[in-house]
Image: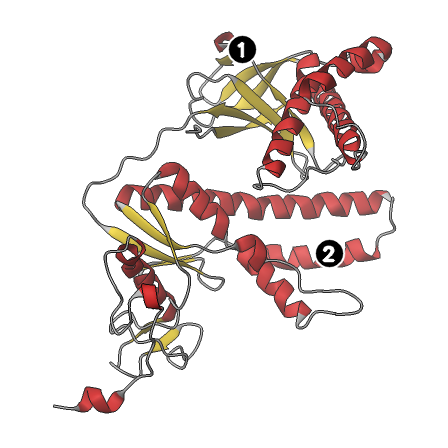
Amino acid sequence: MTRLIDVSRYRLKPTPAQETALLEHCGHARFVWNLAVEQHRYWRPGRKSAPGFAEQCRQLTQARAEFMWLRGGSVIVQQQALKDFAQAMAGFFGGTHRHPGFRKRGRSEGFRIVAVKADQIRRLSRNVGEVRVPKVGWVRFRWSRAVPEGVKSYRVTRDAAGRWHVAFAAIPQPVPAPGTGESVGIDRGVAVSAALSTGEMLNVPPLRERERARLRRLLRELARARRGSGRRSKVKAAIARLKARESDRRKDWIEKTSTDLARRFDVIAVEDLRISKMTRSARGTIEAPGRNVRGKAGLNRGILASGWGGLVRRLEHKAPGRVVKVNPAYPSLRCSACGIVDREARESQAVFRCRSCGYVGNADVNAAGNIRQSIAHAAGHAVFAREGPRVTGPAHREPQRDLLLVR
């Protein structure tokens, strides 16, 4: 059984000289990674297999002996870049990740340090701590919360907005279950990020109206700026800061919401959605162009901005074994009161009106109620009302108002 490794991320505050050294580490890690990618892309059927991690480490030793600029960097940073690539290839062959590609400067900046000792992390004051980075020295970071005990490695990253972070890897402690036997269903959407079967409506905090107006103005400026100009670089940096602000709010909402749900409910039911397939582009090809491309692109942005995958992922981390993924078929079309499936019952995005029993409610809350009711069905202990057994397939019926009126 694999152990879950979580990270606690902190804002790093390097000096200008330290930032230059950190960027040099990032460059070395990116260079080694890209060489490993090139070696594996050179392979073709009939050629000798690409070198593995051990062989690449021997080649790295030879390269460090030959090139002074590479020898001046940290061997830990460079070897861990090869180790990260080996893990990425294992994920690719395991079918869980895509094939690793080339890394670009300014977009994939970061490196990992292992074999960290306890005396390499220390606290200076209430809000300031320090971490020792090889060939850089002590770099300060914001002590926003306690560093996990038993840290053995950490990763330093730089995002597109120019912010540095340090993430300490540790085995997280799950949130204890309340023990009340309560369960909840969660319906994820675009207009409402997460609707609970209890009637609660949760939304990811978006950019404010002034921020969205500024983002639109910056995007227009970016379209007019000449490539390679200083003005274009400044506009891109400003856009990246706004995007980072939006991403931070989404991550903060995911963390707080997932912790609250894990503390309140023993069982959490969600739809088993294939988000990566749902957010694929609809552009198509020149010979077979896609339909409603603009609308599909807007839907994709809405899904990603609502944090569907991140919420479920953090719930599985904090409440292991208590998250149930149910079949996503018909939850928004089924009445949670009588079980009838009717495509005409959902009058709008927000209103659900059952034509059989007369139930009226919020469409998202109704879907969340159906997801909650699916927990027992997913375990094989219940059958929905007015449906046939699953072994023979569902037997949905049209609403029969005349039968309901019989006294």
Q: Quadrant of the N terminus?
A: top left
- Asked whether the viewer can see residue 207, the reply is no
Q: Position of residue 316 (x, y in %)?
A: 40, 41
Compare marks 1 and 2 and give the one earlier in the sequence.
Answer: 1
Colouring rule applied to residues: secondary structure
Outermost residue toward the front in this view = 46
Q: Marks 2 and 1: in contact by CB < 8 Å?
A: no
Q: Describe the element under mark 2 as helix, strand or loop.
A: helix
Q: Position of residue 109 (x, y in %)?
A: 69, 31
Identified by mark 1, the residue type is: Gln
Residue 297 sits above or below residue 352 on the image: above
Rendered image: mark on residue 219: 2
Image-quadrant location for residue 66: top right
Q: Position of residue 182 (x, y in %)?
A: 22, 50
Disc nearest the viewer among 1 and 2: 1
For the image shown, how many numbered marks are present on the structure? 2
Residue that badge 1 annotates = 120
Q: Describe the element under mark 1 as helix, strand or loop.
A: helix
